[in-house]
Structure formats: C-alpha cells, structure tokens
Image: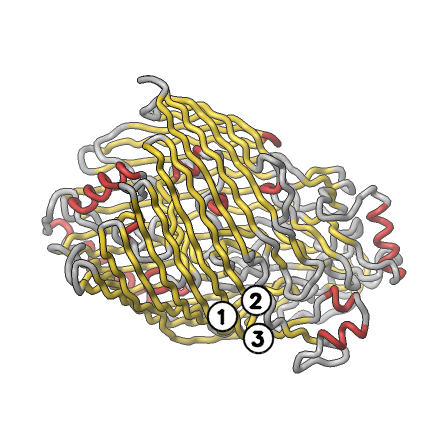
Amino acid sequence: MKHNGLMLLAGASLATLAMPAAAQEAQPGATADNPPEAAAQEAADAAQTGDIIVTATRRASRLQDVPLAVNAVSGEQLAESGFQSLTDIQYQIPGVQFGNSPNDAGFRLRGVGSAGGFSSSSEQNVGTVVDGVVIPFGNPVQSLGDLDRVEVLKGPQGTQFGKNASSGVVSITTAKPRLGTFGGTINAAYGELNDYNVGASVNVPLGKTAALSVYGFARGYDGFVENVKRGETWGGTNAYGGRAKLYWEPSDNFSAYLIGDWSRTKQKGPGQLWTFNRLPSNANPLNAARNGTVLALGIVPGFDNEQSAEDSEGYTDEKNFGGSLELNLKLGDYNLTSITAYRRLDYAFNTFAIDAYPLPIFVARGPGDDRDYWSQELRLTSPTGSMFEYVAGVYLSRQRSGIDGYNNSAQLRPALPFSAQPQLSITAGQTTTKTQSDSAAAFFDGAIKVSDEFRILLGGRYSYDWVDAESFSVVDPLFPPFVGPNGFTVPYTPRARSTGSTEKGDWSGRVGFEVKPAQDILFYGTVARGYLGPTVTFSGLTGSQVQVKPQTVVDITVGAKTQLFDRRLTFNANVFFDTYRDLQTSVFNGLEFLTENAGGFEAAGFEVEGTWRFNRNFSVNAGYTYSDTYFTDYVTACPDSTVAAGAAAVAAQCNAPGSTATTPLFQAKGLPLSGAPKHSVQAGANLDLPINDRLKLDASGTYYYRSEVTYDPGELYARQPGYDVVGLNIGIGAPDGSWRVGAFARNLFDTKFQSAVIVLPFTTPGGAVNWNTRDGRRTIGVQLSGRF
C-alpha cells in the first residue's frame, strides 16, 4: 500500500538520535524525562508517605502533584492482594471496569470504553500503554510478576498518547533492569479450580554499564462451564510466556533500553462461553422444538446457569509478541527520546458456534485474524522546574489486520431440528478481510509557570489517518455450491473484491490551570478535546462495509488533590462532563457485533477518593465514582424484547425516522451506554505489622461494587444487576521481602456475575444468553514469594 514515506522518516529520526550519543556528556544519573536530583527527592518523599511516583505527564512526579484525574497502584500491591491479572485493577481503582465480550471489550473509564466488535478494524477509546509503547490490541501483560506500577489517566489524553486515548489511558510500567546488582524473584500461587500462577525473574549485571533482566511465567485454571451436550468442561485457560529487557548506559548522557516479550494463551471452549439465560417463546413450533432439545439435557435457563448446550467443539489459541527500543540522549538540560516498537497478535485456527443450542444451526471456522502494529515516537522533554515545561514530538504508526488472510467460513441451517436443509453459506464461501491504517501526528504538552502557586496547562496534537481496507470471498472447498463433502449447500456466488478507504486529519488538545496555594493542596481544571480517527470496517461474516466516522469528545474536569494532617489523610475529588459526537460503539445486529457511530452521547459525574494512614503500618482507603451516561441521539435496531412484546409495542416504541414495516428503528435517546454502571465503589484496608526483627505480618482487604448495567440500549433481556465482590489477603514473611507465604481469597462470597448478557441470535426474539467469566467464581488459595 501507500505512505511508505512514513517508514523513511522514522529511520531518519533514529539515525539522528543515535549518531551523537558518544560525544555528549551530562550530569550523573540523568534519566529520560527527569533530572536525577528531582527524581531522587520525589522518591524519598514518597517513601515517607506511601505515595507512588508516576510518569503520567512523561515526567517522574508524586501522584498528588499531577494536575490530572489519575490513579495508580504498584505491582507489589496487586500481587500481594492475590490478584493474578492486569484486568484486576478494576477491583482496586474506582471508575475502572474491564469487559471480555465484544460489545464491552477492554477497559472502561467513567463508563466509556472500547468499541470492540467482530469487524475488520476498530480503534480504542481507552488506550493501553506498556513501557511507553501504545498497545492497540491484545494484552502483553499476562502476569503481574515484573510490574512496577499501573497508572490510570481519565479523560482525553490524546495530546501525548494519541488517538487511541480519547477517553483515557491505562499505562503499565514494568520493572527496569538494575545496574550493578545481581538478584531475582520467584512467586507461586495455587487456588481453587486448580488456579495456578508461577513466575520467576533474574537480574544480571553486564559490566558496570549494562544489565539484563529476564522474567518468565505460567498461569492457568480449570474450566468452570459444564457443556452437558459434549461432556466437557469449558473455560479452562493456560497462559505462559516471558519478557527480556536489556538496559545499557555507556555514559551519563545516553542510554538504550531494549525490551522483547512473547506469550501464548489457550482456552478450552470458544471465546464466547454462553449459557442460556432465557429461552424464546414456544409459540413458534421451530422454537418449541429447539427449546425442547435444551430442556431434555436438564438445563435450567437463568442468570445463574453454568451449563452450556453447544454441540460444536470450541477452543482459542493466541500468540502475542513484540519488542521496543528506547533511546535517550541528554542535550544539555533537555532530553531527546526515541521509542521504536513492533507488536503482533496471531490467532490460531479455530471453530465455534454462536447459536447456543445443541444443534449445528450456526457453525464457523477460520484460521484466525493476525494483526501487527509498528510505531515510532520521537520526543523532546524540557528541563523540570523551568518557566515553560513541555514535551513535544512526532508519532508515526501502521496497523494491519488480516495479514495472512482472514478466511472465515460460516454455515447456517435455519430449519434445524426439523431438517438439515437448507444449508447456507452466510459468508459466501471463505471470506477474507484486510485493513491497513497509517497515522502521523505532531504533539506538544506542557505548562507555563506564572508564579510559584499558579501554572497554565496547555497542549495540542494534530493527527492524520489513512485507512485502506478490502474484502472478498472464494469458494469453500468443504462447502462448495451444490454438492460437496458435507452435503448440499445452497448455491452462492463468491463476493468480488470490495475496497474501501478514508483519510482525515483533526486535532486534540487541552487547556487548563493548576493552583497550588500550599505544598499539599492542589486545584486544577482542564478543558480537553479527544479525537478517535475514522475507519472502514467489513463484517467478518458477510463482508458488508461500514464507513465509521471520526469520534470527538469534549471533556471538562475540575478537581482538587489534598493531603492533610502531616499527609496522613489524602483526599482527592473531581467533577467531569463529557460530550461525545459520533461515538464509535459496537452493536449486535442479530448475527455479529459491528462497529458503528451513535449520533451523540454525554457523560456527567464526579469521583471522590480518600486514604487515611493511621501510621506506617495501617491504612484504609475508599473511592466512589458516579457517572451518568446517556445517548443524546442514537437510532438503532428495535430491541428484541420490544419485538417479542408484539406489534403494538413495536409501533409505539420503534418508530424512529427511517423505520419501515420490515425494519423498525429505535431511538435510544436518554438511555445509558452499553456496559456503563452509574455507580462504582472501591474500598480497602492494608496492614503491614512488624512482629520482630525477622518477621512481619501483612494483610489487606478489598471491596468492589458495580451498579446495574444494560448491554443493548432498550433491551430488557440484556441486563445485569448490580453486584459486589470482596477480596482478602494475609501473609507473613521477612521484613526485607526475601520471603513471604500467604493466603488469599478472590470473590470471597462467590458472587455470581457475567461478562455480559446478550440477546440470542438466529431465532425469534425473546431469548438471551449469559457470557460467563472466571471472575464470577470464588478462588481461595495460597501464595509463596521470595527474592534474592
């Protein structure tokens, strides 16, 4: 495709940075984004108060000194709490949720998250950044063993993190290799459902100027959904992988940081672990016959149903790998940073069914959707403490999906169980979809110091995107037109190559203020504009094309950060109001999830959080987020529950402009965004108590509450009630952390909840399925850790 000039420019930027490295000199211990004196002082202050040092603004700062709505948790806090996955930060940070289903995929902040969908291309509303690298797909952090910290930035963060951060960023920093130190760590945990998690790391100095660290892990658990049709247990997962990091600092003014990671995750059962929530009406003889096959298996539909009736085999297998090279060069008091990165996600061949019945109504197979991403960032950071602090740079990226051909094939047998015919190829053979998205951006973000108490915040980013996509199909040799190896297939004509493209440039940015009347009191306010670029999507099944328009959001946030009583009490609060235009969201059309635009959407609310440190050994914390999300304009398909209620209900509720007798449309104005809770609460307590010179006791507890959500606007059947989850952890070990043994409980009271509840496809309205999740089951276990 085109735009190869982006690659040449990236190569030139790397050459410019690397050549003068050996000739420059600077102060000892300088880092990329912060002078050593400032960083050392910040760390010393943080050690006394339990604060976390963050780099939310690409500078090392105390969390309380950052004029943003940002939260942070250390990797040690996550691990000692018994949590096993990065997604578990939702139980420790208020206003954060994580979804596993396509219409509730990835992280959500303040109720807004990623669009997801089984389309050929979709961008993220909430960005994920690992060691300074934007991650557009997959999860490269499958284990918490080598995490240093996790930061959550809420509201548009496009000025520094790009178009994939229009609603916020989850930034993960892993532990950096340590110069001149040999050591390592080991951790192991085991719990119910054979839930295991083991990991080990080693840090090896390579002379005085370099160090290598390597981390490896394996984790998994048994299945938790009983497939009574196949006599199998689904949901069992195994993941393993590792990360290697090489840090080289040949002089005080130059450093190089090379990172590579690889992981593989396999699951028994399809990605969608469906169980019947409710069956459609028996008024239709076909439905009655199908429902009978479910009830004959002894399955009782309902929210708590853990028995699947699917007849098709299912499994998932994905490999996630990549690497990055960060170069830092000191130019006097300035720092020049280059980050070059590559990532790839490979899905293996898989088969699955999404009809939920013990009949081959819908069966699909495919080689998997392989994706890759290349990025190059070059930025300049001004001195900390100057009158005008700023970070400015350029960013280039290329994302491809369907690299090796996305040859899905799906068959539908709509007359089952009465007849295996007709047999339809709804993909018109084997369908292939490919997309390439190129992006170039220039940005700056900074603050002007007006006085010791007042600063003006400002930043901007201009991005330009090019998207090229294509889709076509060929004859499926297993299901050709007419007669083939699997019987008669209704004749079809493979789809000719269809192409789509779009390109557009737009800006994001922010302006605001910071007032600091006292050392531990900060007030701030910002008006920010976020931008999510356009894309062209093709249905993964039918090949239908959708031109998705750019999404914009204007966010207004005003907040305060305070520490009182010798920093024993930390209390932060903010209010926010977000207005979205052309929100990119995922909708289930009865066949698959597709990304499309909603006309308008707003979110308004507030967040409060506090921590009281009674002493160095004991603290309590709590946070509450209220987020009222609602569509201001969104016309979509008539909800299944309305159709099931009859023609009168359809006529009364599904009469939006554009409606016809065969295609009634529903105006969702005033209804909440899919998967967005209005209330979320997080609370916890931490105890770290020395017993003697050789032993210390630690204990912690967490509480999490999420209010009711709906997964399809106006759909009565696609809802989940509010739920709460309690976690406990206790351990004993050496004060220096050289060893520790403990016990933990996740979801202590075995609270049942689902990833999502969605309407049942391929049938008349009235049915719904649960999308099961491992988190909705209790896990009690033991853990062991050590370091040397």
User: Could you say where residue 53 lies in the image, as x and y percent from the top left?
Assistant: 29, 45
Foreground disc of the pair 3, 1 = 3
Q: Earlier in the sequence, mark 1 or mark 2?
A: 1
Instruction: Determine which of the numbered discs, if any, sits on residue 175 in the image.
Output: none
Rounded to the nearest whole Å, what is the CA distance between mark 3 and mark 2? 16 Å
Return the residue at label 3. Answer: 633
Q: Residue at x 51, y 26 (%)?
A: 782
User: Could you say where residue 193 lies in the image, as x and y percent from the top left?
Assistant: 62, 32
Residue type, mark 2 in image? Thr
Q: Secondary structure at mark 1?
A: strand
Return the residue at label 1. Answer: 535
Q: Residue at x 34, y 43 (%)?
A: 569
Q: Earlier in the sequence, mark 3 or mark 2?
A: 2
Q: Residue at x 79, y 54 (%)?
A: 279
Return the residue at label 2. Answer: 595
Q: Earlier in the sequence, mark 3 or mark 1?
A: 1
Residue type, mark 3 in image? Asp
**For the C terminus, which image quadrant?**
top left
